[in-house]
Image (tube, rainbow, N blue to C red):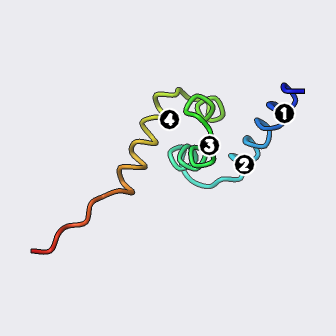
Amino acid sequence: MEDNNERIEKLLALLLIENMRGSQKDKAYKLSLSGFTNSEIADLLDTTPQVIATHLYESRKTKKKPKKKKP
């Protein structure tokens, strides 16, 4: 039963990825927000966890650019 649930989850994730627009970086970020681990995302996007970690780091870094202080 557990294997069936995992298989269904993976199929749903693949359908989600197919319908997503954007780059691999965007897809990785959205999947991360959905609760997938770097390893799971890497498997789904056919890449390595290190590449996913880099994508997520870059995504978070660009979203948190500090505002300039007024003098």
Q: Residues within 10 Å of mark 3 (few under 14, many from 20)?
A: few
Q: Marks 4/3: CA distance?
A: 14 Å
Q: Which mark is residue 35?
A: 3
Q: Quadrant of the N terminus?
A: top right
Instruction: Provide the residue designation for mark 1.
Output: 5
Q: Is residue 57 left or right of residue 14?
A: left
- Tell me whether the residue at label 1 lies in contact with that at label 4, contact meaning CB atoms closer than 8 angstroms: no
Amino acid residing under circle 1: Asn
Q: Which mark is residue 16?
A: 2
1 or 4: tag closer to the N-terminus: 1
Q: Marks 2/3: CA distance?
A: 14 Å
Quadrant of the image occupied by residue 4 = top right
Q: Residues within 10 Å of mark 4 (few under 14, many from 20)?
A: many
Q: Percent x, y for residue 46?
A: 61, 30
- Tell me whether the residue at label 4 lies in contact with that at label 3, contact meaning CB atoms closer than 8 angstroms: no
Q: Residues within 10 Å of mark 1 (few under 14, many from 20)?
A: few
Q: Secondary structure at mark 2?
A: helix
Amino acid residing under circle 2: Leu
Instruction: Provide the residue designation for mark 4.
Output: 52
Q: Is residue 15 above or below residue 7?
A: below
Q: Is residue 65 above or below residue 37?
A: below
Q: Looking at the image, which is closer to me, 5 or 20?
A: 5
Q: Marks 2/4: CA distance?
A: 17 Å
Q: Is residue 7 left or right of residue 68?
A: right
2 or 1: tag closer to the N-terminus: 1
